[in-house]
Image (tube, grey):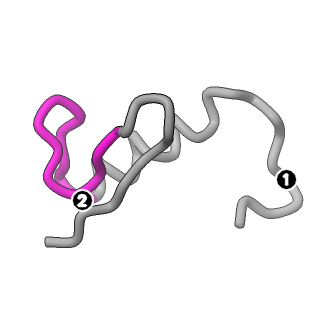
């Protein structure tokens, strides 16, 4: 999924999700598409 250039930086996924939210016009505080499931990960809710 991440490709050969992926590094193990723990913030990599957070940055990726933030950029994806920006492209979708989604807000982290009031998400419409990408929901954070604390302790689990992220959930995509198609609209």
> Where is residue 38 shown, x and y percent of the image?
41, 30
Quadrant of residue 43 within the rendered picture: bottom left
Count every numbered label the image shows and give the total: 2
Magenta span contains residue 14? no
Q: Quadrant of residue 33?
A: bottom left
User: Is 22 left or right of 47, judged from the image as shown?
Assistant: right
Looking at the image, do the residues carrying marks 2 and 1 touch, with CB atoms under 8 Å apart?
Answer: no
Query: Picture coordinates of residue 22 (x, y %)?
Result: 28, 47
Q: Is residue 40 left or right of residue 44?
A: right
Q: Which mark is residue 24?
A: 2
Q: State the residue at coordinates (88%, 60%).
A: 4
Q: Which residue sits furthest front? A: 39
Residue range highlighted in magenta: 24-36
Q: Which mark is residue 41?
A: none
Q: Residue furthest right?
A: 4
Q: What's the residue at 69%, 27% (across, down)?
A: 10
Crowd tier of the residue under label 1, counting other residues whose Cα lies within 10 Å: few below 14, some 14–19, many 20 or above: few
> What's the magenta bit mostly, secondary-structure-wise?
loop
Label 1 sits on a secondary structure element that is: loop
Mark closest to the chain's N terminus, 2 or 1 = 1
Asked whether, in this view, residue 11 is left or right of residue 5, the answer is left
Side of 26 relative to 3 (left or right): left
The kind of secondary structure element at disc 2 is: helix
Mark identifier at residue 5: 1
State how far apart marks 2 and 1 are (Cα): 25 Å
Residue at 37%, 39% in the rendered image = 37
How dense is the environment of label 2, judged by Cα within 10 Å: few (below 14), some, or many (20 and up)?
few
Residue 46 location, x and y as percent?
Answer: 22, 71
Is 25 inside the magenta-drawn segment?
Answer: yes
């Amino acid at each position: 999924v991440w490709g050969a250039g992926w590094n193990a930086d723990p913030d990599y996924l957070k940055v990726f999700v933030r950029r994806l939210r920006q492209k979708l016009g989604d807000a982290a505080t009031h998400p419409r598409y990408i929901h954070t499931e604390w302790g689990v990960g992220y959930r995509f809710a198609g609209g």
